[in-house]
Image (cartoon, grey):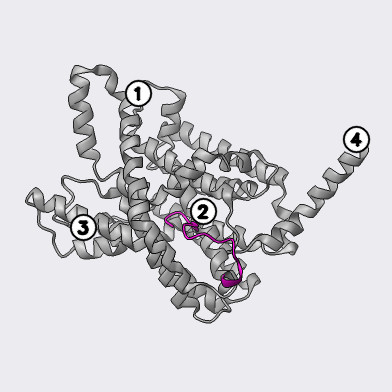
Amino acid sequence: MRRTIRTEARKNRSDEPSRMIQTMDHRHHIRSLDGLRGIAILLVFFFHYYPRTPVTPVSLLAGLGWLGVNLFFSLSGFLITGILFDTRMQAGFFRKFYARRALRLFPVYIVMVIVVLAVSAHFGEHPTWWALPFFLYGSNIVGNLQLPLGVGHHIELGHLWSLSLEEQFYMVWPPLLFLLRKRETILRACIAGIVFSVILRAVIVLHPVGMLDVYNELPTQLDGLLAGGLLALLLRSEKHYAILQPKLLRTFIAIAVLVLAACIAKGHTSHWSNPTMRVYGYFAATVAFFAFIALALRPTTWTHRVGSWTPLRLLGRYSYGFYLWHQLPETFFENIIRKTQATVPIIGGPLGAAIVFALSLACAVASYHLIELPFLRMKKFFAYGDEKRAHHLHADQSVDLHT
């Protein structure tokens, strides 16, 4: 009896690659990746709000919370590249892709911009012409050049850089992938882009060029996005699937963690601005998240079980709105906490962060159901040909970091 069970288990494991390749396409919702989005937004939130003192395991983790954005990039590259590759031969490739992106990203973003302008006007601020490219997904470029916006003095806008970076990726990657067409050619393009990004980062850090910041520009963050794309392509090929064995992936994660630890020790800080982290740590994070996502796709792994945990999956569903709204009222939240802390000291620190988290989540849930979901349902008007035959799709099915 035991021999039969073991034989069956081995058979199931041997069949896993072929089963995953057969189901690895854009029509299938991957539940565990929702949980990874939840982890990513938690990391970002902890980085922005959780107090670093006193030093605790949680505060140390909060110091590395900036890695949440890198996890978002890898998830986006993985899911978007998969969609593009699976649909590249279909009629209306560009029209459908960009219409669906617009329905997912624009509505709540436009509402957020209106709120920002209204709050700024209330405080007597007047936007300059530079606010136009800033809000048209150029905030990372305008911010690096330190151009005057005329708004944002009473409301935090710095986190919008990652939305801009991803939107720039959406402008470049689909046409390039469409032209390359073949899997092998796209694979080589991903690898070339990753190498280019890593080398460019090292050159800029070692030989600074003007105001260019390696943290928030597309060319120097391209490795995370393309590593996700590389994984999407590998998983769609039996020829390449063998290199994604769990043992090797866990080794990647272990080595990446050691490199990150060495960067922290060398630079005496876990912050993203640490020069050693910029040269070595960013790529170590890319490798770790490549392996992390690959493991999350295997039902037998702890990564899959964690990603499938319902609270994390729910948080992942609201991650786009949460990311948009969580920093906008930063000054307002901080003033409330500071005033309350004067009379009730316990309200500061972790409890203060918990209050901000609850308020941000409430905003995200409200914006999702009131703004995002009605537009998501309109994706049916731009359905891909193979989706029309898939009856299990849902209107609110997410497909990337900011989806």
**Kind of element beneath mark 3:** helix
Labels 4 & 3 near each other (Cβ < 8 A): no
Mark 3 = which residue?
114
Tell me the magenta residue range: 388-403
Q: Name the quadrant containing residue 139.
A: bottom left
Residue drawn at x 46%, y 49% as measured from the top left: 317
Which residue type does callout 2 highlight?
Ser
Residue 210, compared with residue 378, is above or below; it is above
Q: Residues within 10 Å of mark 3 (few under 14, many from 20)?
A: few
Mark 2 element type: helix
Which residue lies under the disc numbered 4?
2
- Name the image quarter holding residue 189: bottom right
How far separated are the C-alphas under marks 1 and 3? Answer: 36 Å
Residue 122 tag number: none
The residue located at (47%, 54%) in the rendering is 73
Q: Which residue is mark 1?
A: 53
- The residue sitting at the front extreme is 391
Disc nearest the viewer among 1 and 3: 3
Q: Compute the Cα span from label 1 to label 4.
A: 53 Å
Residue type, mark 1 in image: Thr
Vertically, is 280 above or below 61? Answer: below
Task: Give how far apart the Cα atoms at labels 4 and 3 are.
Answer: 64 Å
Residue 192 appears anywhere in the view: no
- Mark 4 Cα within 10 Å, few/some/many (few <14, many 20+)? few
Q: Main secondary structure of the magenta part?
A: loop
